[in-house]
Image (spheres, helix red, strand yellow):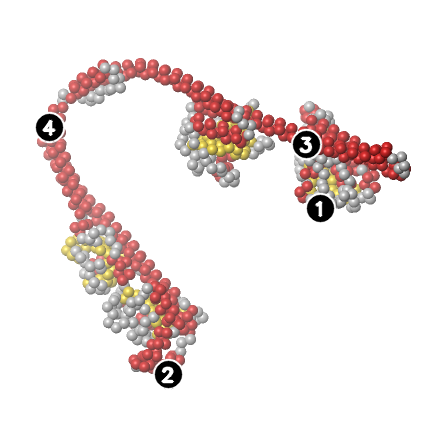
Amino acid sequence: MILSILVIAGATGAFGLTAVYFVGKSILQENIGNEFQHSAQETSKNLSRLFKQKVDETHALSIAPLVLDLLTQSDAHDRSPHSADQDPLEQIRKEWKEERPHAILSEKLLTNPVSHHLQFLHRKLGRSDKDVGTVVIDQRGIALAATLEPKEIYFGDRPWWKSVINASEGEVYISEIELSSPFAEGSKNYTISIAVPIYDPNGPKPIGAILTVQLVKSFFELVTQVKLAKTDHTMLASSDGNLLFCPIFLVKNHTLQPELVQKISQDHPGWGMTRVDVHYPGAKSVNGFAPVVIKNAVPGSFGGDRWFIFTSQNPEETYAPIKTLLLWIAGSGLMGIGLLGFFCFYATSQLIRPIKELQKGAKRIAMGDLQYRLRIETGDEIEALSSEFNQMAEKVKASYAGLEQKVDERTQDLAARNKELSSLYIIASLLNTSLNLKELLDQALSATLKIFGIEAGVIHLLDEAGITLNEISIYGMAARLQNSSRKNHDETILYRQVVQKRIPLSFSDNSLKEKPFKESAFPYFITIPILSKGKALGTLSLLDKAPRPFLKQELDLLIAIGHQIGVAIENSQLYGETKRLDQLKSDFVSKVSHEFRTPLTSIKGFVEILLSYTDIPSEKQKEFLSIINQESDRLIRLINDVLDISKIEAGKVIWRIEPLDFSELINASAKTMQSLVEAKKLQLGIEIDSPLPQVLGDRDQLTQVLNNLLSNAIKFTQRGQITLLLKRLNEREVLAGVRDTGIGLPPGELTKIFNKFYQVAHAQKDLPKGTGLGLAICREIVHYLKGEIWCESTLGEGSTFYFTLPVAFPAPGEFERASSLEIK
């Protein structure tokens, strides 16, 4: 059996090695070919970008204003000292070859402003080599400016000149790689020349060209320095078979085999297998290739040929991974076969092992190790016996576990109750240390987070109107600004649901369509309502970075803490309300005392004068008695106003709310005040829309509102008109108002005038004085009737006091019930 196993293993290993070799070799060739193709393609793109950069630099020089001015103003006759009968071009070429005229022409060529500008740019770019330079040539082919002295001044007979001067705008000429330069004799550096046409801004044709000569060093380094492994090379070749750039051979010093040229000179990137590699001929090599694409190159560029990037690698390195893999697999296979033989032999000595394992397990179970289980899988009677032992141990363990579980459950329950009572005591102690709401909530939130081991939390409370939730206390994270972002919108929906439903919500609730806090540092949350006497006061949210499920006991504790916080909030609010009422009481007593003292002082002063002097003329006595009478009336009005507003605020006024035709009340008030209006020679107008619904109100109280507003308008209007207004505002309200053309009010006084005892300070000292309670009484009456009152005024032009009243629209038979409830 052992021999059969070894034979089968050996045959399987040999077949596997053969399959791995051929499949692996094919995959390796494809992967390396794709990698070489990508490398050649990227190198081609980088070389094209470098050419574009050099072309852009040359083009930038061609559009310089100095260059354009020089070309448009060039004139061959200005440059020749001889007569105009001679051919200017021939004359200039002749002079260039003569020593003295040559010196004059060379000086003019190198010292004009354009040449200085170009020389400055070359120095700035670090181009100091004698073979590198720039020359500006006019449309006749004559050099007008240069960074270095060229070998010839006339370029019109160069092969590329016609292509450049007739090129369309945007086209460029790029030469082949040359061991020569227009600027130096016997150049030893390979160069590439770039020429672009220069166009007249006002004409469609070129007026010249600019030629720059570049060293091939930067192009050579860009190509040859690309390496993927130790023996691979990246090279540049021409379609005529010349090897232009190579890290081993000199520039243009090697010719490629036609088979290799045909393989790499494709119009698109790719890879292939050849046996005519540049550096490794005879072996089957992988070559990646890609064409060098230069857009807008004029015909004749690159010497009329095309350039290609291609790669080469030593086949030994190419196939080294597959050979290494085969060696490792073969070695591992031989080792495996040896181990297999050893273990097959060793297995025969292990037949007694299950019996020893059974004996060992029986002893451990008998000694009380109920966790130990026999693991024997022999498929015979020994395995059946071990199963019986395991079942016996499981039953004994279950008996012990049941007892331990009951003890643990009771212990956990006692610990939970103890924690709950301790936590509630801590929270209650903290809540009783201060009546300051912010300080109280900060302490409660911090203690709650420590109790549950939560990192962050926030408390929101409803405002007095019960509409807006405000962030009061926050712990563990920076305070968030309230804005209209989606995040705060989702959080507001969460808080609203908790307040309205009065139930806790957490990140696992399916009722939340949009999960709040999901984009924050604390995406997991639980939010409970803060309640007091069944009323929701706000929310308490606990936030954490990781999901934290709450047990029922923990949730009950958290809800109890929320109730404690609610009671503490209500106590704090009651304390604040008590302080506010005490302050209002003190302010009221102070203001009433002041208002009573003023008329009483005046009455007492004039009475003392009348009692102290017997020789007062009768006219003076009448004047003093008249003042005493006026002050007495003022005192009576003040007492009546104080009693009225005190009754309203104390809720002791008997309201008789019923449907009223408010237009009748307006007409009645107008008739009552008509005499006062006529006494001041004012006009009294009434503007009432028709038809109007009835309003809900108290006839006597609304009459007092109208009389107070009319009295104020008459007092502070010296000329013009007073108008009573009434119109329908919407389906539920009507709008009434009193408009005058009096002295008006400053903008800052429009809300203060409804405060008790408040009187506007006017520059005019002779204006009548009131009690300062009339508008306060109006406000209390209108607010009780579910309306609003306000003032709109322009200083010096007049004021308008508006107030709204609800429309009476209950169905017949229901109004009596609604009215009785309101009265109650």
Callout 3: few (<14), some (14-19), or many (20+) C-alpha neighbours within 10 Å?
A: few
Q: Residue at x 20, y 21 (%)?
A: 376
Depicted 87 relative to depicted 405: above or below: below
Which residue corresponds to mark 4? 345
| Distance CA(mark 3)–CA(mark 4) | 109 Å
Q: Earlier in the sequence, mark 3 or mark 2?
A: 2
Where is the C terminus found, in terms of image quarters? top right
Choose the circle earlier in sequence order: 4 or 2. Answer: 2
Q: Secondary structure at mark 4?
A: helix
Q: Which residue is mark 3?
A: 587
* Residue 798 at x, y percent in the picture: 73, 45
What amino acid is labelled 3 in the image? Asp
Image quadrant where one finds the N terminus: top left
Q: Give the residue type that dot 1 points to.
A: Leu
Alpha carbons under labels 4 and 2: distance apart: 112 Å
User: Residue 349 at x, y = what percent?
Assistant: 11, 24
Residue, disc 2 = 81
Percent from the top left, x then y, of residue 312? 21, 55
Of the numbered discs 1 and 2, the one sitting upstream in the chain is 2
Residue that carries the numbered disc 1 in the rendered image: 795
